[in-house]
């Protein structure tokens, strides 16, 4: 249709100066003409040049007045030729916007006398505005001042019209030759490949996008945090056991058995297997004592410690449970300083909301060495978080059953323009370390944070359910580039 019109027209004419006029002269939609021009240009049947033209188009309000007349004329016609009409009466006869604009325009044009009563001041008026709008609609020229006044009344807006001027191309032919895009068996059998014109190879054509796996944003940030820990000389702890005994998750951490976190409101206890198979009996005895009657300078919690409570299996509530196992194993060896880290899932029976699910990934770091102080903890925290791009830290005294002193960590986040709580930390209590068998002067400083929070902030994800779980929009994972940690 449009193709034959264009190729046919160029058979007799040098050029098609304006695809817009060509379309209207041939009763074609300009878009169809443009698509054909692009395709013929692609095959070099024609040579098309962009042409732009600024034109005015009517706004919706402009279209209304072009159809129904300008508001001032509608108002004028609503005023009786003789006598007058009350303003309220008049208002009822017209749409609110027409009445409002009509009053100001007709008033300005001194067509009517706008008092409590409204009367005509002239016999007849021309609807110049309507005429101008119709001329614009018909792409006819109108004067500069008229353009400005219509523009001022937001009845017309500028529009860039894009079209093409077209000339014959190097492969011009009045009819598009069917170009073969493939040499088929039939072509060979019919030996008609000689006549056939083959489409050029387009070596710049992009192949189909290579579908590949995409790392979940959480895993991208996890990898960067692992790199930071490894660069700081930390060794990763094995976290491949979501199921833990209450002993390693709580008791070994000197967390008393009646501590609120140890009831099913906060912790997922297992039905099967409900109890752990074995614990290091001699060490369990020491833990029992320190809970019940203290020692090592502590008076303990002075309650009856129950083995069956410690035997209960649960989904670990923190990766600190892994730290406990690793520190216990470390204490069995001749002492050597150690830096450990873990990043893995922990489970808490919490109500789900925008930032909390029943599970999240905990990041934990610990340094075990002789004579470590709170200063060393603050030092390693500044080092660690500065590598995450968080340099300005503040510390707020906090409480954990297994660390004393403990501190919540805050950082001023330039992007969010506020102080953000970025983690918790402390020095493991002697009641935890000494029963393990560590020498008196060995101290362990540790800290923890979540993986979800930094990932949500870095990827600008507002609701944790958009980050993790069955509602995640996979395209988000596909589309999201790596956010470089440490770069604001
Ligand atoms: O991750 C947390 N906040 C955070 C971290 C990084 C971050 O980076 C942004 C790019 C800039 C932003 C925010 N928090 C810890 C703080 C809060 O979100 C807190 O409300 C929620 N916390 C979780 C626990 O919720 C019950 C985050 C999680 C958390 C808290 C404490 C520990 C671990 C995870 C710990 C510990 C610990 C303490 C002493 C010794 C050993 C471990």
Image: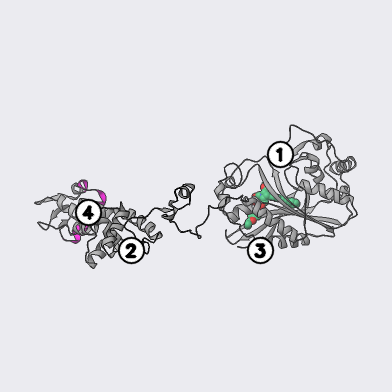
Q: Quadrant of the C terminus?
A: bottom right
Residue 458, x across and y down, in percent: 60, 56
* Circle 2 or circle 4, nearest the eye: 2
> Of marks 4 and 3, which one's residue comes earlier in the chain?
4
Q: CA distance from mark 2 to mark 4?
A: 41 Å
The residue range painted magenta reads 91-110
Q: CA distance from mark 2 to mark 1?
A: 78 Å
Q: CA distance from mark 4 to mark 3?
A: 63 Å
Q: Is residue 150 left or right of residue 342?
A: left
Residue 364, x across and y down, in percent: 73, 52
Q: Is residue 486 left or right of residue 276?
A: left
The residue to which callout 1 is attached is 267
Residue at disc 3, secondary structure: loop
Query: 405 or 21, which lies in front?
Result: 21
Do we see residue 485 in this rendering?
yes
Residue 438, x across and y down, in percent: 88, 52
Say above or below: 167 vs 36: below
């Amino acid at each position: 249709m449009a193709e034959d019109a264009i190729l046919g027209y160029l058979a007799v004419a040098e050029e098609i100066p304006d695809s817009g006029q060509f379309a209207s002269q041939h009763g074609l939609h300009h878009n169809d003409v443009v698509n054909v021009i692009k395709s013929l240009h692609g095959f070099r049947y024609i040579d098309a040049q962009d042409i732009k033209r600024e034109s005015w188009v009517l706004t919706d309000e402009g279209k209304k007045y072009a159809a129904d007349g300008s508001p001032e004329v509608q108002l004028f016609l609503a005023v009786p030729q003789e006598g007058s009409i009350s303003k309220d009466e008049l208002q009822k006869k017209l749409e609110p916007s027409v009445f409002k604009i009509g009053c100001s325009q007709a008033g300005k044009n001194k067509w009517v006398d706008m008092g409590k009563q409204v009367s005509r001041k002239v016999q007849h008026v021309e609807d110049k505005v309507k005429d101008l709008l119709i001329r614009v609609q018909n792409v006819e020229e109108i004067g500069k001042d008229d353009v400005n006044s219509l523009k001022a009344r937001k009845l017309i807006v500028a529009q860039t019209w894009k079209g093409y001027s077209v000339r014959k191309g190097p492969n011009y032919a009045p009819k598009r030759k069917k170009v073969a895009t493939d040499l088929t068996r039939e072509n060979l059998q019919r030996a008609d490949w000689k006549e056939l014109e083959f489409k050029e190879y387009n070596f710049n054509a992009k192949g189909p996008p290579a579908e590949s796996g995409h790392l979940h944003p959480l895993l991208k940030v996890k990898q960067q945090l692992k790199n930071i820990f490894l660069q700081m000389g930390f060794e990763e702890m094995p976290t491949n056991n979501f199921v833990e005994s209450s002993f390693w998750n709580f008791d070994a951490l000197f967390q008393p058995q009646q501590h609120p976190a140890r009831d099913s409101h906060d912790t997922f206890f297992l039905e099967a297997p409900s109890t752990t198979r074995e614990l290091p009996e001699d060490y369990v005895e020491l833990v029992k004592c320190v809970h019940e009657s203290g020692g090592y300078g502590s008076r303990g919690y002075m309650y009856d410690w129950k083995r069956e409570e410690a035997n209960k299996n649960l989904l670990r509530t923190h990766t600190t449970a892994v730290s406990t196992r690793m520190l216990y194993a470390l204490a069995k060896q001749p002492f050597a300083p150690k830096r450990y880290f873990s990043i893995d899932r922990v489970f808490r029976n919490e109500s789900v909301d925008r930032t909390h699910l029943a599970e999240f990934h905990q990041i934990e770091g610990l340094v075990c060495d002789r004579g470590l102080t709170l200063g060393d903890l603050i030092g390693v925290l500044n080092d660690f978080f500065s590598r995450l791009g968080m340099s300005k830290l503040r510390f707020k005294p906090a409480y954990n059953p297994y660390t004393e002193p403990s501190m919540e960590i805050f950082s001023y986040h330039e992007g969010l323009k506020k102080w953000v709580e970025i983690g918790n930390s402390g020095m493991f209590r002697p009641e935890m370390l000494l029963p393990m068998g560590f020498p008196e002067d060995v101290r362990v400083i540790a800290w923890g944070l979540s993986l979800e929070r930094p990932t949500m902030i870095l990827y600008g994800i507002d609701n944790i359910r958009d980050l993790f779980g069955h509602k995640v929009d996979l395209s988000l994972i596909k589309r999201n580039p790596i956010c470089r940690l440490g770069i604001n």
